[in-house]
């Protein structure tokens, strides 16, 4: 069972990594990041709603707390998808994916503020390590020749912050109801939020464009099957193992960008990326234990 769980989480991480490449392709075709993010989540919502209906009697629950936490998760995933897309557009897939995985640090800092967790030297060391990795990855150590635009760096970190918000919301909602219910409510609110901020004319134009296949593929790979794989996989394996395996996402995204889209990373950027991923892995394993 544990091998199956690891396999499902690995598939989910690979799907998420590939979704960044698909989003980059669509942006190079002139599509707005908001539209791309909306379709990614909307297609995912169709999958989650079908999954919810599959066992409706078991998944249906009336709880205000479930709706509130799921709504918070929806806000988190809306911000995560959108800022991730903006970061890809302003920087690169590799940078965006790596910065997004600073989310556990934001979770840790919020836990400190809310006094959910006790601060230790190891945790602050991990935070310092991630900060140093971000400085190396973005080139912030040399402001005269910064390697990543400020917009790309800020958007990537914002994606990580909203990812942390999604983690908080999803974790608390899933403790009340089934993951199917949480994902359905979260992605329904996601669609409503992004629809309010996205150009309706461009949303409609996607339907008749030649790129509709790319949008559908992004939604299926980047939200639909990947989240289902991950939710099932996380129940079949240890959280510490899941944390390590999920690091395949930024690696996959980076390889996609370098091999297929022509992105380039300097040696210092690679060192920064490695420092972030190793530190986050250590922190995630420690938190799981």
Image (cartoon, rainbow, N blue to C red):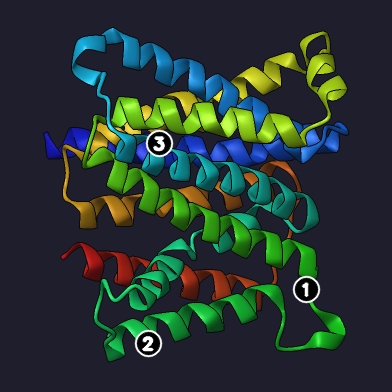
Q: Position of residue 169 (x, y in %)?
A: 38, 48
- The Cα–Cα distance between marks 3 and 1, rounded to whole angstroms, is 30 Å
Q: Residue at x 20, y 11 (%)?
A: 57
Q: Earlier in the sequence, mark 3 or mark 1?
A: 3
Q: Position of residue 272 (x, y in %)?
A: 57, 75
- For this rendering, which residue is in front, 193 or 99? 193
Q: Earlier in the sequence, mark 3 or mark 2?
A: 3
Mark 3 vs mark 2: give the one in front. Answer: 2
Q: Which mark is residue 147?
A: 1
Q: Residues within 10 Å of mark 1 (few under 14, many from 20)?
A: some
Image position of 235 (left or right of 15): left
Q: Which residue is mark 3?
A: 12
Q: Position of residue 62 (x, y in %)?
A: 27, 25
Where the C terminus falls, by quadrant? bottom left
User: Residue 257, relative to residue 36: is it above or below?
Assistant: below
Looking at this view, name the residue that lies furthest to the bottom: 121
- Could you tell me which secondary element the residue under label 3 belongs to? helix
Q: Residue at x 43, y 42 (%)?
A: 13
Q: Residues within 10 Å of mark 3 (few under 14, many from 20)?
A: many
């Amino acid at each position: 069972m544990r091998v199956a769980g690891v396999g499902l989480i690995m598939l989910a991480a690979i799907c998420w990594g590939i979704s960044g490449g698909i989003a980059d392709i669509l942006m190079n075709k002139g599509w707005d990041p908001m539209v791309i993010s909306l379709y990614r989540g909307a297609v995912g919502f169709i999958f989650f709603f079908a999954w919810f209906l599959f066992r409706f009697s078991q998944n249906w629950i009336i709880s205000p707390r479930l709706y509130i936490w799921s709504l918070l998760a929806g806000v988190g995933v809306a911000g995560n998808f959108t800022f991730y897309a903006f970061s890809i557009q302003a920087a690169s897939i590799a940078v965006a994916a790596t910065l997004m995985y600073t989310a556990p640090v934001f979770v840790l800092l919020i836990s400190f503020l809310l006094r959910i967790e006790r601060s230790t030297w190891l945790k602050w060391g991990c935070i310092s390590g991630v900060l140093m990795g971000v400085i190396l990855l973005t080139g912030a150590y040399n402001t005269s020749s910064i390697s990543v635009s400020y917009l790309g760096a800020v958007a990537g970190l914002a994606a990580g912050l909203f990812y942390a918000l999604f983690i908080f919301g999803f974790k608390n909602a899933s403790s009340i109801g089934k993951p199917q219910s949480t994902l359905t409510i979260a992605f329904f609110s996601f669609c409503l939020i992004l629809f309010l901020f996205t150009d309706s004319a461009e949303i409609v134009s996607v339907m008749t464009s030649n790129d509709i296949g790319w949008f559908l593929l992004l939604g299926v790979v980047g939200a639909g099957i990947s989240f289902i794989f991950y939710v099932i996989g996380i129940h079949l394996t240890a959280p510490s193992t899941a944390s390590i395996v999920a690091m395949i996402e930024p690696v996959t995204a980076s390889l996609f960008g370098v091999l297929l889209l022509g992105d380039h990373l300097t040696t210092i950027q690679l060192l920064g990326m490695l420092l972030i991923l190793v530190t986050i892995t250590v922190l995630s394993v420690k938190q799981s234990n």
